[in-house]
Amino acid sequence: MNNNRKIIRVLVVVSALFLMLLTYLLYFNMFEAKSVATNPYNRRQWDDEKYVTRGTIYDNDGVVLAETVGDGETIKREYPYGRLYSHVIGYCSQVYGKSLLEREFDSDLLGKGDIDIFQGNKKKGFDLNLTIKNSLQKYAYEQLRGKKGAIVALEPQSGKILAMVSLPDFEPSADNLEKNWNDIVEDESAPLVARAFSGLYPPGSTYKIVTAAAAFENGFLGQTFEDTGAFEKGDLKVENFGNKKYGEISFERGFEVSSNQIFCTVGFELGSEKVLEIAERFGVGKNIDFDIDASSSRIEYKKMTDEDAALVSIGQGQLLVSPLHMAMICGGIANDGVMMTPYVVDSVTKNEAVISKTRPKTFAQPIDKGCADYIKELMVNTVKSGTGSRASIWGIDVAGKTGTAENETEKDHAWFVGFAPADAPQIAVAVVIENSGKSGGDVAAPIAGNIIRKYLGK
Amino acid sequence: MKRANYRLPAYLLVIMNVLGFLLVFMANDYQLNVLYVGLGMMCLFLLIYSILVICRMGDKFLVLIASMLMTIGVLMLCRLNIVTGARQIVWIGIGGIVFFATYTIYYNIRFWHKLWFLYAALGVALFVITLVFGKTVNGSKNWIDIGPIAFQPSEITKILYVMFLSCHYSKSWEKPFLRVSPMYMTGFVTYTYILFLMLQRDWGTILVIFSIFIFMIYIYEEKKWFLWANVGAATVVALIGYEFLYHIQVRVGVWLDPWADVSNKGYQIAQSLFAIASGGYFGRGLGNGSPHYIPEVHTDFIFSAICEEMGVFGGAAVIILFFLLFYRCFKVTLNAENEYNKAVGAGLTLMFALQTFIIIGGVTKFIPLTGITLPFVSYGGTSIVVSFASLGIIQAISAIEDRKGAEALEQ
């Protein structure tokens, strides 16, 4: 009966093989199936389109942004606004597949799970209703035209995206893609990258908002500093923007004029641990559960020293954030310290009947209301009498912060983040202009100001 | 034992058949043919099962589990093409006859363990016939035509091979042949078979035969070094094969990254993965998928079609059914007192298990793909008939044990 023991061992091995097969099958379905099924070579994706007319995409006011027209062999996906939504809606090509909303909401657009019985005629997929306002989107696009960069405008209380522009962009029609694909892919300015949520930039001084929160909690309020124009520690030397010297000023004034020396000092004294901790609370390194895959902001140090902390505190060093995340941080200050998860699809409908509606979700609550109010005041003063004055609007308190971020090129990125009205915020905006070579206060602040003015109808 | 034990699982089978074929009936534009096929199959299963129970032919579950697997297979085949489904029923009918024939012959003849030379020679003869008269299908020259029927001799060879090995491992063959001891003879015959199979480019069967060999050595061979020598030899041969055979390089390359060349080399596996991925957990529904995009969907890739339309859970159910089948087979093997029967049982069980693992693992990209049929599920006369024959042998082994048990009780 010795053989029986060995046969049982073989049984165990065979069982293990089958268990592995089962596990693998489930694993495949959980983690790999989605990207495999949406591979452009999978013809099934286009089978459905034979029986289903792809749903329409509307803006917040019912303006058509994407629709499928034609019949039989001549079906075409049309984008009436062309490039305007290339980095929100994406494209839908039989050859190159689908991207962004066309991809993420593919099954909704194809009406999957629709229990309507249909015979003969084509079924209609579900429609998407976006939170974006077409008029604001167009306006923001005009503001950034000809530059590289991104604009994200959102509603602080809900996380609704009001406008989201990334430039450079591309003409998303399938015809154009199929004709010019190689040119688009090989273009050095990377027009296929949706900078607003996939682009990562050093945030520069806009990040002082986050540092100010840590300063508030660690008793730097009201302290005065001797600003000599540069922060020096060992080999590290950080000068103020434009080599300005402010003399003896308060921490608050340091925020308004964006003194690098003061913020480096604060960051250094807080130390790497606290600087990392506040960054994490604001969502650096955290996955943003956006409707479209968004890059997470990050701080990349093997081992972070206090000197590194000084650099991160002014938004330099190994810190990279996305414009979307910066708008969320700004929205968090506007919303009493509660950051909302952004979303762009407000509801999925069929013939105006709601199939599903997005509910606002909290992303993080990094600070309390007291701290948020304090930073808000600093930001209001920044626009009133500091570096952000070019974002000011007659009759409204705008809160904001500028940034001019050094990067691996010669030319700095210009940043502005802000919201308004300060006492009852309705819109938060982040603007970044890639390699503009000018300061955020000069080029980014006016754009943000214009967008806010347009939205508030002033 | 209570009678209900035999009836309940049979009801389950009936319910599954009725529901399944009604679904296919609806999906196939209400063609009555589907219902005839379904009815025919159900009657066939019930007939086989009744004979088993009434004549007390040993284990009752083997056939039931196999019937469930065949039901899933025929459902899928009818959905793909009703003519294929109907043909499969005919094969299942023939398979049933072969099942009882094998059972009766195996049960009544008691000198199987003496015929090692016959098995080996028959195997070689089949190979030679295939090489001379064979035709090439999908790059493998492993089919021969006899009148209107095409069949794959290598399927039959697998059973002969197991019976051959068992002669030695049951210690009924210990005399050297031409001064070569039986242990070396098993190695010699195995590698001869593998050489023939390589000439036919039937990599799947090579894998099955060699794995059976390794497991059988592990169970029975007293000289441990023989196991390691064979594993080592296999590794060396595999490495050399990978180095020099373009065929094998392509297969491994495609396994590592099927997406590099989706439209050519990776086409088969990519289509299979598309199908599985599109099915999700619960499938797209019988008749709602596009399994026709999968090449060889009737035979080697039927599992992918099942996953697409019945979902990953459907696929998991098939795997679990197979697992139950092996479990029952292993049980029969463990209970067998006759050493020869035990060895044959172990070998045939391993044959089922490994073949299932290799093809399901292959189409899901768990292991490199080598084309073989999924026992009882894939379309194919030889596959069905040979699976039934193997099951018949295992059934006979279980009946022999039952008979002994009954005799012991009487005394």
Image (tube, grey):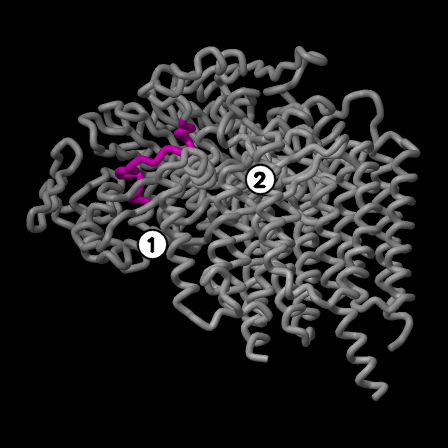
- Name the spot of residue A97 as percent of width and height, x first: 53, 25
Residue A448: x and y, percent? Answer: 39, 27
Real-space CA distance between mark 2 and mark 1, rounded to the nearest whole angstrom? 77 Å
Q: Which residue is mark 1?
A: A278
Identified by mark 1, the residue type is: Ile
Judged left or right of residue A85, residue B167 is right
Residue drawn at the location 79% of the way across and 74% of the way down: B402
| Residue at image location 55% in from the left, 31% down from the top | B139
Residue B266 locus on image (x, y percent): 50, 32
Say if A84 sits above or below A360 in the image. Answer: above
Q: In which quarter of the view is residue B252 placed?
A: top left
State the extent of the magenta-drawn residues as a range: A193-209
Which chain is disc 1 placed on? A
The residue identified by callout 2 is: B128
Q: Is residue B394 left or right of residue B135?
A: right
User: What element does badge 1 sit on?
Assistant: helix
Q: Which of the numbered marks, if any, corresponds to residue A193? A: none
> Residue A456, how many percent across, how many down?
50, 27
Q: Nearer the viewer, residue A263 or B242?
A: B242
In the image, residue B194 sits, relative to residue B227, either above or below, namely: above
* Magenta highlight on residue A95: no
Q: Amino acid at mark 2?
A: Val
Q: Is residue B260 left or right of residue B145?
A: left
Question: Crowding at label 2, few (<14), some or many (≥20) Cα neighbours within 10 Å?
Answer: few
Give the chain of mark 2.
B
Residue located farthest toward the left when viewing the structure as drawn: A234
Q: Nearer the viewer, residue B326 or B192?
A: B192
The image quarter containing residue A322 is: top left
| Element carrying mark 2 | helix
Viewport quadrant of the N terminus of chain A: bottom right
Residue under the point 49% across and 41% down: B198
* Residue lying farthest to the bottom in this orientation: B411
